[in-house]
Amino acid sequence: MSRNYAGLSRERIILEALHIIAGRGLGGLSMRRLGDALEVEAMAIYHHFPLGKEQLFNAIAAYVTSTAATSTAPADEEVADENAPEEDEQDPQAREEEDTRPWDVRLTDWADAYRARLLEYSGALSLLVHRAPRTPSSDATRALIHRALTEAGLTGEDVERGADALHSYCVGAVVHQVRHQDEEDAPDAAEAEARFHHGWRALLRGLA
């Protein structure tokens, strides 16, 4: 087994873990199997995830739910990542503050990106049941949604409740699609997207 760990990064580890999950399911992911796939000893993974599998699972959940333009692996909250890429010079929240499009357009663009991300890594959906890592991307998303809902006329607790409803709809719609995708009468990709947008528009109308 190679001991040359040059090029081994958090993002490479996460992507290989997602590949294993896609083929074997979440239960098929082990540090040993991941090390074999990366052609390194399993202990090399612990250099990037010293707290082990739970820390890796949190990082995977953060990666899957990131809707950033560049899908780099987020730095872990508990352990600083010296190999993490540098942050973009312009803060995501600052970019959002400059976005003057209507609130519903901004929310729909976010929902489309979030849905696509969840579908791409649908094998890891079960991780999201118990994990909601706090990352710069999640903070930017929260700011985007809260600002848009405030522009829509929501105030106080209704903003937080509305944000919960939007997140729940996106995740629930993807779970429903993935759960039934192999059925004979399952809608094709275009119809599934149309159904998603139909429900999304109804939800936005109800919130506003």
Image: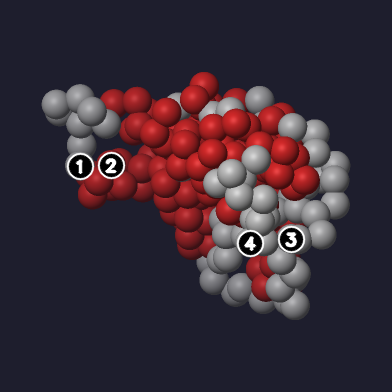
Q: Image check: 131 left or right of 50?
A: left
Badge 1 local density, few (<14 within 10 Å), some, or many (20+)? few
The amino acid at mark 1 is Asp
Q: Nearer the viewer, residue 170 or 73?
A: 73
Q: Image check: 74 left or right of 128?
A: right
Q: CA distance from mark 3 to mark 2?
A: 36 Å
Q: Nearer the viewer, residue 167 or 16?
A: 16
The residue sitting at 25% across, 46% down in the picture is 189
Front position among marks 1 and 3 = 3
Q: Which tag, 3 or 4, sits closer to the chain's start? A: 4
Residue at numbered disc 3: 84
Question: Do the residues bearing badges 3 and 2 touch, measured as CB atoms within 8 Å?
Answer: no
Residue at numbered disc 4: 7
Front position among marks 4 and 2 = 4
Q: Report if residue 135 is visible in the image.
A: yes
At mark 2, the secondary structure is: helix
Q: CA distance from mark 3 to mark 4?
A: 12 Å
Q: Report if residue 149 is visible in the image.
A: no
The residue sitting at 73% across, 76% down in the picture is 90
Residue at numbered disc 2: 192
Residue 188: numbered disc:
1
The amino acid at mark 3 is Ala
The residue sitting at 74% across, 69% down in the picture is 87
Q: Which tag, 4 or 2, sits closer to the chain's start? A: 4
The amino acid at mark 2 is Ala
